[in-house]
């Protein structure tokens, strides 16, 4: 009797750890292992795979059943997610996460029987679908069917250090874990059970960390010379110049001659400090926030 469809009745006895139960569980895991190409040595999910854990717990040392001859081709055309259908066990966690947790409704079950697979609206690529690349499907995938493309080869789970931080992209304050190896971010995941995001991230929070390692990123303040070219400056010199400019404008034209727009990619605390700066120090109410529009 299937536990997922058997109603509870008075006097029922549920046995969860008997020899028969253990034997049945082992058979199910063996069938799951034979349904795909589960080569843990080269899999990105090695060390963070629920199927691998179950196989170890059940004491499985070999695959007794024959594997299919062909699998659906791997999709890696998009820059964020690799879909390896040969490792998919059709558990449906990605479908539930997409449809019920983040409610994007980009994927669902497709086809029937041995041809079953997880599909987008028209069984096309993620790029051509309604997917917004929040990566929630990757977050909940228990095997190596869905992995972060940018994290490939960056480090095994046991090689990385998890550092909790707040997403820098907006004022929501989503909690995230940076998986760091040798001082470099390998991937980003959400913090389960943490406010306010409750294990969810958007595409920017999960995949938008490339700017940290950009060669074009500014590493020192720049001051424009009279000839129009920029020169490097210290923070003290740059801030003194900004203060002097603002003071000169306010003295000549009054405080309402200046205005500020707080960035939506700043935290709520930063935006609060900026409006206090303009209202209390500059003595003007000319302060806005670009997220309002």
Image (cartoon, grey):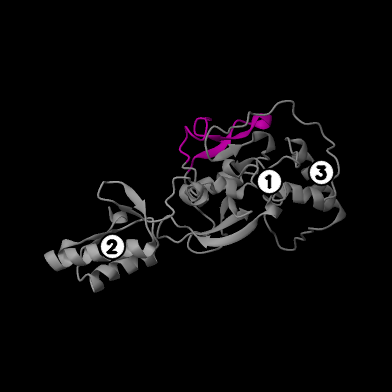
Viewed as shown, does residue 174 lie left or right of 53? left
For label 1, the residue is 45
Residue at x-position 67% and y-position 55%: 7
Helix, strand or loop at disc 1?
A: loop
Residue 105 visible in the snapshot: yes
> Which of the two residues, 29 or 37, is positioned nearer the viewer here?
37
The relative height of residue 140 versus residue 248 in the rendered view (above or below) is above
The residues tagged by marks 3 and 2 sit, at their Cα atoms, a distance apart of: 73 Å
Residue at x-position 25% and y-position 50%: 226
> In the orientation shown, which residue stands out farthest toward the top?
69
Q: Position of residue 285 (x, y in %)?
A: 20, 67
Image mark for residue 100: none
Residue 244, by quadrant, is: bottom left
> In the orientation shown, which residue stands out farthest toward the front?
227
Bounds of the magenta segment:
105-131
Image mark for residue 27: 3
> Which of the two residues, 205 or 50, is positioned nearer the viewer here?
205
Helix, strand or loop at disc 2?
A: helix
> In the orientation shown, which residue stands out farthest toward the bottom?
280
The relative height of residue 216 versus residue 72 in the rendered view (above or below) is below
For label 2, the residue is 241
Residue 117 is covered by the magenta coloring: yes
The residues tagged by marks 1 and 3 sit, at their Cα atoms, a distance apart of: 22 Å
The residues tagged by marks 2 and 1 sit, at their Cα atoms, a distance apart of: 51 Å
Q: Position of residue 230 (x, y in %)?
A: 33, 49
Label 3 vs 2, first from the N-terminus? 3
């Amino acid at each position: 009797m299937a536990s997922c469809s058997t109603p509870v009745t008075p006097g029922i006895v549920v046995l969860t750890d008997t020899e028969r139960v253990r034997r049945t569980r082992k058979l199910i895991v063996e069938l799951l292992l034979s349904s795909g190409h589960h080569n843990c040595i080269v899999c990105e999910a090695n060390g963070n795979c629920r199927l691998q854990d179950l196989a170890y717990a059940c004491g499985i040392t070999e695959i007794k059943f024959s594997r299919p001859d062909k699998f659906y081709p791997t999709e890696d055309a998009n820059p964020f997610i690799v879909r390896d259908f040969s490792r998919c066990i059709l558990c449906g966690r990605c479908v539930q996460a997409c449809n019920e947790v983040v409610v994007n409704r980009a994927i669902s079950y497709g086809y029937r029987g041995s041809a079953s697979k997880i599909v987008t609206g028209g069984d096309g690529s993620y790029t051509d679908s309604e997917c917004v690349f929040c990566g929630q499907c990757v977050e909940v995938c228990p095997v190596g069917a869905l992995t972060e493309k940018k994290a490939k080869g960056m480090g095994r789970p046991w090689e990385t250090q998890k550092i909790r931080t707040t997403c820098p992209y907006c004022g929501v304050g989503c909690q995230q874990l940076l998986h760091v190896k040798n001082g470099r971010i390998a991937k980003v995941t959400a913090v389960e059970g943490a406010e306010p995001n409750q294990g969810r991230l958007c595409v920017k929070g999960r995949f938008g960390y490339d700017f940290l390692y950009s060669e074009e990123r500014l590493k020192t303040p720049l001051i424009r010379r009279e000839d129009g070219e920029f020169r490097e400056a210290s923070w003290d010199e740059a801030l003194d110049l900004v203060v002097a400019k603002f003071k000169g404008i306010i003295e000549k034209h009054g405080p309402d001659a200046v205005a500020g727009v707080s960035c939506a990619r700043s935290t709520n605390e930063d935006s609060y400090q900026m409006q206090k700066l303009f209202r209390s120090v500059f003595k003007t109410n000319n302060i806005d926030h670009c997220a309002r529009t």
